Amino acid sequence: QVQLVESGGGLVQTGGSMTLSCAASVSTFTFNTMGWYRQAPGEQRELVAVITSGGSTNYADSVKGRFTISRDNAKNTVYLHMNTLKPEDTAIYYCNAAVYRSGTYYPHWGQGTQVTVSS
């Protein structure tokens, strides 16, 4: 059974930086994509950033230029480096790892970590 464990959330001031980590219980090579989603109160969960097994990345427009996703395959860990944080970045951040097989999407989710940006 795949487990994803997030860490690194907390409280930060506007303009500050924070790094989230997501440690997988299996090799990151297992997954076609790994990424981060977030959900603010009263909002739908949205994609923040994703990285493929080949290293390609994609970001939400709202975080481009401020957030960077990376992965350390030796540590089975994916990171989200967040800079110039804004109050609107406040949300629960969820790690996602997905396998695509025969046209079917198999997602795995972490338990989420709270990020709060104070104004």
Image (cartoon, grey):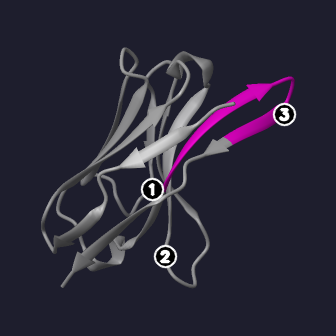
Our reading of the magenta stretch's main secondary structure is: strand
| Contact between labelled residues 3 and 2, with CB atoms less than 8 Å apart | no
The magenta region covers: 94-107
Q: How far apart are marks 2 and 1 (CA)?
A: 15 Å
Relative placement, left or right, of 50 versus 64 is right
Q: Name the residue under label 1.
A: 60
Q: Quadrant of the C terminus?
A: bottom left
Q: How far apart are marks 2 and 3 (CA)?
A: 28 Å
| Contact between labelled residues 1 and 2, with CB atoms less than 8 Å apart | no
Q: Is residue 104 magenta?
A: yes
Q: Is residue 69 magenta?
A: no
Q: Which mark is residue 27?
A: none
Closer to the observer: label 2 or label 1? 2
* Figure quadrant of residue 103: top right
Give me the residue at 35% from left, 49% from top: 7
Q: Which mark is residue 40?
A: 2
**Few, some or many C-alpha atoms within 10 Å of disc 1 (few <14, some 14-19, many ≥20)?**
few
| Contact between labelled residues 3 and 1, with CB atoms less than 8 Å apart | no
Q: Where is residue 92 in the image (x, y as percent from the top left)?
A: 45, 66
